[in-house]
Image (cartoon, rainbow, N blue to C red):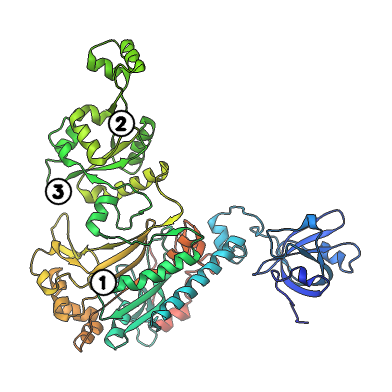
Amino acid sequence: MHAYRSHTCAALTSANVGETVRLSGWVHRVRDHGGVLFIDLRDHYGMTQVLCDADSPVFADVEKLRSEWCIRIDGTVKARDASLINTKLPTGEIEVYVRDLEVLGPAGELPLMVFGDQEYPEETRLTYRYLDLRREKMQANMKLRSDVVSSIRKRMWDQDFREYQTPIITASSPEGARDFLVPSRLHPGKFYALPQAPQQFKQLLMVSGFDKYFQIAPCFRDEDPRADRSPTDFYQLDLEMSFVTQQDVFDTIQPVLTGVFEEFGGGKAVDAEWPQISYRDAALWYGSDKPDLRNPIKMQVVSEHFAGSGFAIFAKLLEQDGTEIRAIPAPKGGSRKFCDRMNAYAQKEGLPGMGYIFWREKTADAVAQEMGIPVKEAQAKLKSGEVAGGMEAAGPLAKNIGPERTEAIRQQLGLGIGDAAFFLGGKPKAFEAIAGRARNVIGEELGLTEQDRFAFAWIVDFPIYEADAETGKIDFEHNPFSMPQGGMDALQGDPLEVLGYQYDLACNGYELVSGAIRNHRPEIMFKAFEIAGYDEAEVRKRFGGMVNAFQYGAPPHGGCAAGIDRIVMLLAGEQNIREVILFPMNQRAEDQMMDAPSEPTSDQLMELGLRVIPQD
């Protein structure tokens, strides 16, 4: 028999009854049923119930076992009584009677329990991650991650892609985040960088004649942490293709992700249609370039209804250049209680508030006022049907702008009795993000956001440039290496009107994919950077390897990168990306388990020619 096991803890069934078997694993829990000890023995594959009574030669040893001790047992497989079969376990028809026991690794007092679903502080979970990872949910998440990566690889190979590995130690690359620098021992005073992405290398592969490349690539960025982003490193499906258009990239990645989400999405619907929405429309309709399309709410511009109106705040605001008023429709949100709650939400987000109108059945007060009769008489007429009830608008804004403008807003937004609308104004960039978050909250609270669905959308037509609000200086707003739509001709006019062949893929409010058709023509690249204030010499200095390569017959090429961590987070139904990463950093970019970052020794610093300057 094998030294440690003849079967895993998920393998035994009624077909094994009567066999002598050997199992190894961890003591999940121990139950004492009046002289009979039951142990749930767990390994990576599953659970087997093991029992021991006073007749067993190792009963005294079994009595000493505690949770998370690692043990080996030999025993006989027995059938459970019909009334005791556990249909939730693959091994639920049997149990193993212990005849021999070996403790492979005793466990001390546990800082967190593996059994059960207790919540523990993140600090505890990350310090003792090896225990946290033993828990059923974490085992399932990490198996899911492995299976997703395997599925992605197969789907890429099936589309004639090959996987190539690019360097980890390289030069600094401008990807929009801070580099992790690595000092060079052989070249004192100089530094390598960990790659923020394989961007330049994969483009150089296209210049080298490799038509289709992909890689499950590690990327390193010194970023501030968020719930959906690791502060140090992450993995992405990185791909690049030669002789392709933007649509070719879409047609390549869509079946890969559709298949993965159908395979691992737990039965949730996966949208077949992936709409293409311009960056400007996404900002207008959703307040975000990663909209959650499960929420049907679309924001609209309603400036005309407030211009010159009795609501002085908005009317005066619209007299300023570049301002507008936007409405967030809220179907089923037509109660003062809900409207006041959303107004408080806006104040918590740093705005003075959020104006609102809601529509309700016409009250007796309104009928009395219209007809010039007492309220009681109006109530009687409404009750008898002599007067039709109809609808009225309520809320401070409705009183200020009057019934005609209010009705025009209602018709534009397609709302009715029981609905509401919220309003924000100013320069769009100042309030778009808050409006987008408010839209998400409204959709969730009113039950409008579908939960059992993965909704994808391509965000396209990103502007390449933006102007500084104070100085007017032109700089890059998005990826400077994207090919401008229209090529060199597009760079001769207003820079703020130049759009790039750049695209993101959003799913359920998260950015999953980012990519572009690359600017592979040096003369166009030099002109694009010149507009942003960088001369040719600066471009050659910073991106010399790529610029030089483009002078030797560079093909048109493009690609994208899909975040593995976020994909698995969505598939696992988690809200925090650390739940799908084996050994993540905490919110302060610290590895509490390995005590990183740590101070270098004097010898290490001397060898590298470095000195640490104490921070005040």
Q: What's under tag 2, amino acid-wise?
A: Trp
Secondary element under disc 3, as helix, strand or loop, is: loop
Above-or-below relation of 531 to 191 = above
Q: Earlier in the sequence, mark 1 or mark 2?
A: 1
User: In the image, is 11 to the left or to the right of 410?
Assistant: right
Q: CA distance from mark 1 to mark 2?
A: 45 Å
Seen in the picture, residue 91 relative to 380 is either above or below; the reply is below
User: In the picture provided, is 443 more to the left or to the right than 304?
Assistant: right
State the separation of the CA atoms marked 3 and 2.
Answer: 30 Å
Q: Position of residue 134 (x, y in %)?
A: 62, 65
Disc 3 or 1, which lies upstream in sequence? 1
Q: Residue at x 23, y 78 (%)?
A: 542
Sequence-earlier tag: 3 or 2: 3
Quadrant position of residue 25: bottom right
Mark 1 residue type:
Gln
Which of the numbered marks, if any, corresponds to residue 322? 3
Which residue carries the number 1 mark?
A: 246
Viewer-proximal residue among 66 and 19: 19
Residue at figure coordinates x 41%, y 62% from the top left: 229
How far across and down, in percent of the image, does residue 200 sit? 30, 79
Q: Residue at x 79, y 65 (%)?
A: 95
In this rendered view, identify the residue nearer to me: 532 or 148: 148
From this viewpoint, is residue 482 visible? yes
Q: Which residue is mark 2?
A: 359
